[in-house]
Image (cartoon, rainbow, N blue to C red):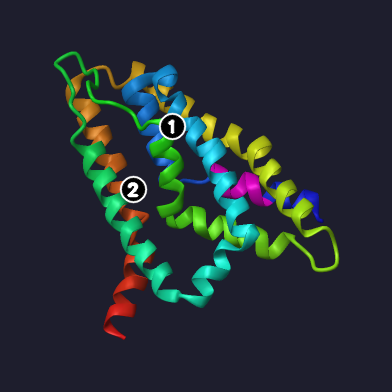
Amino acid sequence: MEYAALIAFTLTTFATPGPNNSMLMSSGLNYGVRRSLPHFLGIALGFPAMALAVGLGFAEVFERQPILHTLLKVVGVSYLAYLAWRIATTPVDNRGVATGKPLTFLQSCAFQWVNPKAWVMAVGAIVTFTHAGGNYLLQVLTICLIFIVFGAPCNAAWLWLGRSLQNWVHNSQRLRHFNWAMAALLLASLLPVSYELLQLLMG
């Protein structure tokens, strides 16, 4: 297994903007690091667990029944749109403090299964960095471990970035503007998947 290439893949994909990082940044700003820890841990552990399931054959189910994959995409787009609305409408008091609730650990874990970027990352890593003839299970477990060791700090950086902006977004209007921007960014991440679904429906 090409460990250096896998680590580079992990750092690149985990550090770049996407639904998980956008939501973590928003949660860090609105609720702080401590209240957002369950959300962060849900990503740090939930995504490797999903990748493990993919590696153990879950992706084959979708290959045999493509309609299930399409339905999952529809659910994912719908849920992400709901989360974007939830971010945009986060209750804010007059002091510029969010009064809503961050995602729980289980909600964050479940979200990985409907996150389009997570699927691309999981399937891409399993297909690219496993090889026939070796200990396949060990290879998959190694990939998941590297996701935790090198990926979680990248997610944590986005959480801390959101927290660091609290000193700048110190009034209700700025906080609302920030939340609208994060919601728009989350919706923008849905455009490729939405276009793909539209093509499927029209085809």
Q: Residue furthest bottom?
A: 203
Q: In the image, is residue 14 part of the stretch drawn in magenta?
A: yes
Q: Residue furthest right?
A: 133
Residue 19 picture location, percent across and down? 41, 46
Residue 133 picture location, percent across and down? 85, 67
From this view, report whether residue 198 is shown above or below residue 12: below
**How much space separates mark 1 and mark 2, taking CA atoms?**
20 Å
**Do tag 1 and tag 2 residues touch (Cβ < 8 Å)?**
no
Which range of residues does the magenta coloring cover? 9-15
From this view, report whether residue 96 is shown above or below residue 151: above
Q: Which residue is mark 1?
A: 105
Q: Residue at x 46, y 46 (%)?
A: 17
- Which-is-in-front pick, marks 1 and 2? 1
Of pointers 1 and 2, the one earlier in the residue sequence = 1
From this view, report whether residue 85 is shown above or below residue 26: below
Residue 40 picture location, percent across and down? 48, 31
Quadrant in which residue 45 is drawn? top right
Please state which amino acid type lies under the numbered disc 1: Phe
The label number, if any, that marks residue 160 in the structure image: none
Main secondary structure found in the magenta portion: helix
Please, what secondary structure does the residue beneath circle 2 have? Answer: helix
Q: Which residue is mark 2?
A: 186
Q: Residue furthest top?
A: 95
